[in-house]
Image (cartoon, rainbow, N blue to C red):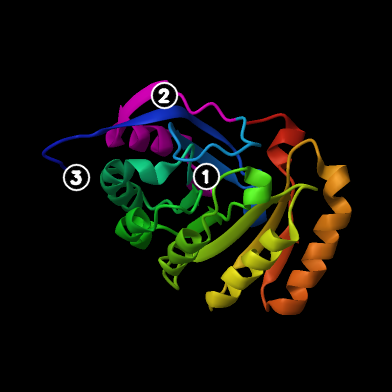
Amino acid sequence: MTHCCLLRADLSDLFVSVQGEGPLVGVRQVFVRFAGCNLACSYCDTDFSARLHLDWKGIYDFVAESLPVHSVALTGGEPLLQVRFLLQLLPALKDLGVRVYLETNGTLPNQLSEVAHFLHWVATDVKLPSVAKVPPQWKVHEEFVRQVPDGVNLIVKVVVSEEVSEEDRERFEALLLQVDRDMIIVLQPVWGREKETVPLLLDWQRRLLRIFPHEVRIVPQVHRCLGVE
């Protein structure tokens, strides 16, 4: 595989660990953590600064040396901010035969459309303004979810705290009703506030199960319980 111009990605980290969020909890993955994000959520404590600058071959070699793994997780920060680099990396990972799991804040639908055919899972956040303390993203989230092809496993995650508003719950449900496709819905409590949120999580899970024919799971951040990245 050759390219006339090898781009370099800005990464904050590259490592092997276990997936700690959502329905793939516990699987072994190579994590490609991209630097930079276009949002600033109130509960986020991830360091997005760039510490590594690698071309696709550097990441490819690391993945190859780390096999066997379940999949490669593209996370961040926001990986889709570096979509031109992904267009060089993803064909190489496909040639290697590894599956790809994208973790994204779900606000860059045009960039997703460029790489979606290389992906096996898209785990997208829907940012609740009352919890994340960011401007509403409802329309762009809906457009983003519509860009996920039917053959790609879709995971829709919302981070929940006791501050969540009824308006945000209703807007989230309305968004899902607009998107008629299979998905897994994940309710994730803000780290460190799980106990306070349990009654709300259980109530919302029951409410969602009455509305949607989808899986609805409550999954805390298990990797933090294990003390790993």
How far apart are labels 3 and 2 at the CA level?
26 Å
Which residue in the structure is indicated by mark 1?
69
Counting residues from the start of the chain, the first of labels 3 and 2 encountered is: 3
Rendered location of residue 191, percent (x, y): 74, 38
- Does 124 sit left or right of 18 as displayed? left
The numbered disc on residue 129 is none
Which one is in front, 79 or 18?
A: 79
For residue 1, which numbered disc appears in the image?
3
Q: Earlier in the sequence, mark 2 or mark 1?
A: 2
Mark closer to the observer (2, 1): 2
**Up-down relation of residue 222 to residue 62 (above or below):** below
Residue 187, x across and y down, in percent: 71, 56
- Image quadrant where residue 55 sits: top left
* Placement of the N terminus among the 4 image quadrants: top left
Q: Is residue 60 magenta?
A: yes
In the image, what residue occupies the spot 35% across and 62% down?
117
Q: The disc labelled 1 sits on which kind of residue?
A: Val
Tell me the CA gap for discs 2 and 1.
25 Å
The kind of secondary structure element at disc 1 is loop
**What is the number of callouts on the image?**
3
x 65%, y 63%: residue: 185
* Residue 143 image-quadrant placement: bottom left
Q: Label 3 amino acid?
A: Met
Q: Amino acid at mark 2?
A: Ala
On residue 50, the disc is 2
